[in-house]
Structures are given as C-alpha cells and as structure tokens.
Image (cartoon, rainbow, N blue to C red):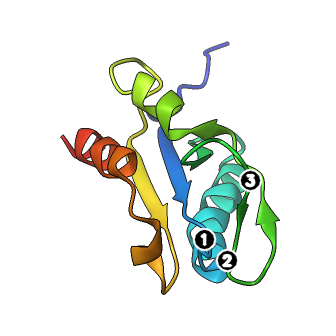
Amino acid sequence: MNAVKHPIKRSFVFFLIPDFTMIAFATALDPLRSANRMLGYEAYRWRLASIVGKPVRASNGVECAVNTSLEDERKKMAGPDRPNMAIVCSGINVERYQNKSAFAWLREEYN
C-alpha cells in the first residue's frame, strides 16, 4: 500500500501583545485549526509567543497562555523550526508596548 503524501506543512507564530484584540486573533487562528480537522492531518502548525514567554491579557480581560518567548523564537530563526509566517496580534494601544527585541525579531523574520 502506498503511503499518503501530504503537502508541505506551514507554521505560524502568533506574537501576542498585551491588550490584543481577541476576535482578530481567533479569526486568524481558528481557520487553521478547522483546516487541519477537515484535511485529517496537521497541515498548519502554530506557536503563541510573548515578549518574555508569560501569559498575555487580551483587551477583553482574558489571559492567554503562550508556548514561547521572543528570545526562544530568535534562536529558531536559522533552524528547521523557523516559522513560515509571523503574525502580530495587537490592539488599539500598540504604541505602549514598543520593544526593541520585538522589532529586531520581526526584521529577522521578514528577511
């Protein structure tokens, strides 16, 4: 019997900034989860990141656990765990959370 070959998997990092908008985050993440279920295999993978790897509170007050920190994500940039895409989830007061490490990571991810 032939093994089923699946297309290349895609990976995402959702970078959560304090006071991020939960509905925008869910709208980006849930189609990936649904697609995996419909396809019957993990075509899409994701990690949730914050600046220091601690939970982040959304604008609606819900705290969201994360898998990784920006420091850990920067270490993955040169290896097989480098994400295909980084998505920044923020809210209306994003300017309050400017961070040099985050800007550097985004520049590295873009290149």
On screen, residue 26 above or below 34: below
> What kind of residue is marked 2?
Met
- Coordinates of residue 67 in the picture (x, y in percent): 69, 39
Q: Nearer the viewer, mark 3 or mark 2?
A: 3
Q: Which residue is mark 3?
A: 55
Numbered mark located on residue 22 in the image: 2
Q: Residue at the spot x=75%, y=84% of the render?
A: 60
Q: Residue at x 62, y 63 (%)?
A: 29
Give the structural element (helix, strand or loop) at label 3. loop
Which labelled disc corresponds to residue 74? none
Q: Position of residue 26 (x, y in %)?
A: 66, 72
Disc with the residue nearer the chain's start (3 vs 2): 2
Residue placed furthest toward the right: 62
Q: Are marks 1 and 2 in contact (CB under 8 Å)?
A: yes
- Circle 1: residue type: Phe
Tell me the element at label 1: helix
Q: Is residue 50 visible?
A: yes
Q: Estimate how packed mark 2 is, as few (under 14), some (14 to 19) or many (20 or more) residues with alpha carbons within 10 Å.
A: many
CB atoms of marks 3 and 2 within 8 Å: no
Of the two numbered discs 1 and 3 on the same chain, state the one appearing first in sequence: 1
Find residue 25 and name its label: 1
